[in-house]
Amino acid sequence: MKKIITLLLLGLMVSSYADVRVLKHNKAAEVFTNWHFFENGRGMTISPNMSRLMWMLGEDRRAENKADPITRLISKRYGFVEKDDKLMGVFNVKYKNMDVGVLGCTACHSGKAAGVFVPGLGNKTIDPYLISRDTLKIQRFWGWGNQDPDYKYIHNKALAFAKVTSDPKISSLTRGLVPDSTIKTFFYKDHGLEYPKDMGRAQVKAPHLWGIKEKRLHGIFNDGSLSGESYAWIFGAELFASDSGDHLRAVLPQIKWLTDEVLANLLPPSYPFKVDKEAVFKGEVLFKKTCMKCHGEHQRDPQGHPIYTAPKIIPQKVVKTDHEKLKAISPEFVRLVETGSLGDILTFNHDKIQKGYFAPKLWGVWSRFPYMHNASIPSLYQVMLPPEKRSSIFSMLEAGEEHRFDKVHVGLTLFEKRELPRMLRRAKRGDRDIYFIQREGQSNKGHYFDSFTKLSHQERLAIVEYLKTL
């Protein structure tokens, strides 16, 4: 009898611990979804009072229990994620008798996969270039003649933000990608220099954020060259937007808290559909033979939740994926940062510069399509195909919605054969809604190894089935 009671108590303890982990995730998701770094007039903003028109119309429509066409239009055009009739990561902040439209973290770092909203997932459809191009046109005339110093301070920073992000020489070329080149412009300005228009775009998809507490100690984001010891690089996108090193120093305690107490509690999303358990078993065996050497083990705690561990950096000569992102950390850029006003808190892992890319842990990988750091491969199945057999074009429109999700290959649905000639013409003309591997920094080559050549179609599908469970 005592043994039975002991087992029951242990079971209750385990269940309680599991519930605590889920509760922490839910609380973290709520906090992060509503977080932004606007303070003292500084942040990622549009010109003051521009937001009044958008929010006023939206509130009127909701009061009448009608769909808000303004919200829907903005969401579709610019790629903001819409949830409960709201644009995620877009805020209206009251500041000194002004309404300030503010972009928060979740504009880029929360998104949808198979119709499921996932806090901490990179937004697959966001288009920073188009947002900035359109807002720049309006902001040039908005509030003309307003001499209030508080207004002008925010307005001028918003204009500078939009000008850089909409610069066609350094902007991203496809929706769903963000250009690291825009962050680099801050450091030229920090030295009183004009930024060069040929410094490369270094386009990447917005990274997922679960596990970042452990990962940052080994380097931030794709290649580990940016040190996470001080937390400051996590603020990169906001830094160039607010154009203020003082802003970064002011909010650094918040960044540390958000990383260690909020993002640290995010769990990866569970696959929302049924899996083939027999195929999962076969796929796990194959995964250990083909993928685990680079991606490592994926251990779980007693409740089945992930145990986050550091990823390995795979040399460029081995992985052979597009190297434009690596070139972005140039000797000139390193010098600008280290001799600038923030050189004490923005530091590098010099031993990792231009060496290679992380082989990331694959928790929640089913949701992280398109794959590779530059989003060049539309599905997990195609990751295991030779590059010449991977899709060269695919649509990024509504990429997170369920009707765009391929449950068999796990990733994006593709154009039908009859559509390909017309879509290829559009891609060659620069259509931002279409991913095209011939664009700068968007090559889909690499990440194809000898172990993949031996896989059959069914074995690839089995590995995909196993990956659904991580």
Image: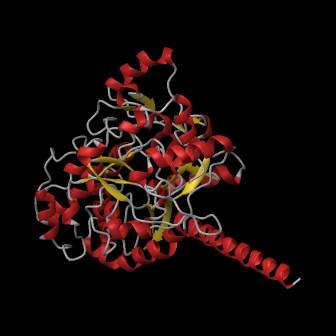
The quadrant of the picture occupied by the N terminus is bottom right
All told, the count of numbered labels is 0
Measuring from the top left, give residue 91's x and y in whole percent: 50, 61
Q: Is residue 277 left or right of residue 36?
A: right
Applied colour scheme: secondary structure
Taking depth in this image into account, of 315 and 271 the one nearest to the observer is 315
Q: Residue lying at the far bottom in this picture: please name it.
A: 2
Measuring from the top left, give residue 72's x and y in whole percent: 57, 43
Answer with the quarter of the image where residue 435 lies.
top left
Taking depth in this image into account, of 194 and 147 the one nearest to the observer is 194
Q: Is residue 415 left or right of residue 407?
A: left
Measuring from the top left, give residue 114's x and y in whole percent: 60, 43
**Vertical order, 108 against 322 (above or below):** below
Q: Residue lying at the far right in this picture: please name it.
A: 1
Whether residue 276 is visible, yes or no, is: no
| Residue positioned 34% across, 35% down in the render | 444
| Residue positioned 81% across, 77% down in the render | 8
Measuring from the top left, give residue 284's x and y in whole percent: 56, 48
**Vertical order, 347 against 312 (above or below):** below
| Residue positioned 29% across, 67% down in the render | 153
Taking depth in this image into account, of 381 and 427 the one nearest to the observer is 381
Whether residue 215 is visible, yes or no, is: yes
Taking depth in this image into account, of 360 and 283 the one nearest to the observer is 283
